[in-house]
Structures are given as C-alpha cells and as structure tokens.
Amino acid sequence: MYPLLIDWVGLIIRWVHIITGIAWIGSSFYFIFLDASLRQRAAMPDGVAGESWQVHGGGFYHMQKYATAPADLPAELHWFKYEAYFTWISGFLLLALLYYLSAELFLIDPEVWDINAGVAVLIGVASLAAGWVVYDQLCKSPLGQNETALSAVGFILLVAVSWGYTQVFSGRGAFMHSGALIGTIMVANVFFIIIPNQKKVVADLIAGRTPDPALGRDGKQRSVHNNYLTLPVLFVMVSNHYPMTFESRWNWLILTCVIVVGGVVRHFYNLKNAGKGEQYWLMPIAGAFMLAAIGLSLPPRSNVALEDIPEVSFTEVRRIIDVRCTVCHSATPTFEGFDRPPGGVIFDDMRDIQRSIPRIRTQAVNSRAMPLGNVTEMTDTERQTLSHWLARGAPLE
C-alpha cells in the first residue's frame, strides 16, 4: 500500500508540474512574442512604446506597451507570477521525492563518488542556491551591461557546472540537477527581480512618483534570459525516460549541445517575431548541434570480429539476470519499497527475457542506467558478458 501511495503522490505532483509549467512557459513565450511584435505607429498615446494588433478565437485585440508605465494606473492589473512559483515548487518536490528520498537509487553512483545520501542532498540543494547567487551577481556586475559577454560567460559557467555535477552524482542525477539549476535561476528571476521591480513601479505610480526606467530594463533582461533557457529545461524534464542522454559518458556535452539548440531555435523565432525576417541559416546550426548530441550518445563501436567474440550460454546470462535484475524485475519483487516490477518489466522466465532483449541492450549494456544506482552491484565483467551474448544474437539455449 505504501509504495502505491508514493506513486500516486509522485503522479499528482508531476501532473501539477506539467500544468503549471505549461501555463508559465505559455505566458512567457506569449509576452516575448508580444514585445517583439510591437510597432511604432502614428497617433499613439503618450508614453506608449509600441502596439500590436492580434486576432485569436474570432476576436481582435489591440495590445499596447508603455515604456515605463501609464500616467494613470488602471484599477485592475493582471499579474503573471504564480505559474512560475508553483512550477518550481512542484519541480523541487519531485526532485526531493525521486532523487533525495531515494538517493541511493537515483542520485548516487558509488563508481562516481561514494558519498552518503545526506551529503549528496546537501550538495544538490546548496548548488541550486549558489548557482542563482553567482548568476544574479553577474547580471548586476558591469558585465551585465554587455548582453553578448554576459551570455557567453553564463553559458561557459553553465557548461562547467553541468560537468561538475557528473563528477559528483550519477548520470541521471547530474542531468536532473543541471535542469533544476536552470529552472531555479528562471524562477528566481521572476521572484527576486521581475515581480519586485514591477511592484516598485506600481508603488511609485500610486505615490505620484516617476518610476525608474531601469526597473523595467532589468526585468526585461531577466525575462529574455528565461526565454532562451526554456527549451533546454523542457528537454531535461523529458530526458528522464531516455537513458541514452544522461548515461552517456558525454552527458554534459549532450546537454551543452541541447542548450545551444534551444537558444538558437528561440533566437530564430525572436528575430522572426520582431520583424527581422526568417533567418533560416540558424536552423542548420541547430540541426548540426542536435546531430552532435545524438552522435555523442551512441555507444562505442566494436572492432572485434564476430568470430572473435566469446560464446556465452543462456545459463550464464540467466544467472546474471537472476542475481542483478530480478530483485526488482519480477512478478514478486524482493527489493525493499517495490511491490511490483518497475515499468512492468519482468525476467521470471525465458520468454520474459526474450521480450526484453532491446531493454537489456539499452539499459544495462549500452548505458549503465540499470540496475538503478547499481544497487545490486552488476560488474563491468557481467555487462561485458551480456554484450557478448547480444552480439552473438542472444541465443536462448
């Protein structure tokens, strides 16, 4: 009963995370588009920086943006902030539920660094906070006045941190923390900069003071950063189900390629929406980096001729599976906390194993995704044995 309830809690939190994420990303993309689509026209009201005419759902909308704020504050303002907050809260709860409460399975890899769960969790949480502080100070430094230089330094630091995570956590844990760090920076931008600056502008208007234009500029800068970081975060969110990304020895480089792809794709659409033309030359760049990510995920090719690969009996393979895999992947799992096999995958008889040959190849041979956290201590020799068996056509006799 207890594992079932945990699964339900995880499912509900993930559902909330997806719903709030859609709301946040959707509004973020829309307002970036809106800013880019603004045009100067004759006879606009005083203080209006640009306007945009839009059509949706059978109706026409006339959108205007003020350079700082309108002279008279309207009675009703619609704020966009809770979508971001609840996306981060639900995401952190998922991180805690999956990676912190089950650190030995998902977060720690003894072959990377044999640390206890408490230290691993402390490093994970502290790195998220430290990452935001470093990024925030960079934006507030003189470097923040040069957007190109700031972006370059931020990109290099993000890649360095992603590599650093791979020296501490499992491949899965490193990948998820890289995404969590980006998400934390994005939400902190909203919580600490964008919304407070907007509140200061509103307070100045109510008090009859002229708002500082820098408040809007700083908020816009962080909003643009969020826009360029969104697609890589989404990739990390779904990559949890694809071990060829996080279990590759080049996982940090794969993520680097994805960050570039996401940034280039967003830049294409930002330029297009700003009326600067469709810069199709950007798409081959994105495609090249995506192909590079795919190439980095491929397992090394073996130059050994088939006749030189040792023959492996199914009896030997069955022994490895029984010892290392069936504690979880059985109709009656014996591993603590599992009352049913993960993903419905079982290895109880020869037919079960035959049906799961592609999974064995992907999860235990081409990557180290299974066993989770290598809790059953599958050795490299055993993985090599499975590899030889598969190369020989996976004979079942």
Image (cartoon, rainbow, N blue to C red):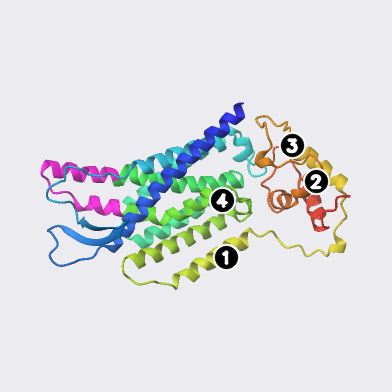
Give the residues in magenta. Answer: 195-220
Q: CA distance from mark 3 to mark 1?
A: 37 Å
Residue designated by label 4: 239
Tag nearer the camera, 4 or 3: 3
| Residue 306 x/y as whole percent | 84, 63
Residue designated by label 1: 291
| Residue 82 x/y as whole percent | 35, 40
- Image position of 249 with respect to 81: above or below: below
* Image position of 319 (left or right of 200): right
Residue type at mark 4? Ser
Q: Tell which circle, 4 or 1, labels the residue nearer the N-terminal end.
A: 4
Residue type at mark 1? Leu
* Residue at screen point 87% across, 63% down: 307
* Image position of 194 (left or right of 234): left
Q: Is residue 101 visible?
A: no
Disc 1 packing (10 Å; few <14; some 14–19; many ≥20)? some
* Image position of 359 (left or right of 61): right
Residue designated by label 2: 351
Q: CA distance from mark 4 to mark 1?
A: 16 Å
Q: Tell which circle, 3 or 2, labels the residue nearer the N-terminal end.
A: 3
Residue designated by label 3: 330
Q: CA distance from mark 4 to mark 3?
A: 25 Å
Q: Are marks 4 and 3 in contact (CB under 8 Å)?
A: no
Element assignment for label 4: helix
Element assignment for label 1: helix
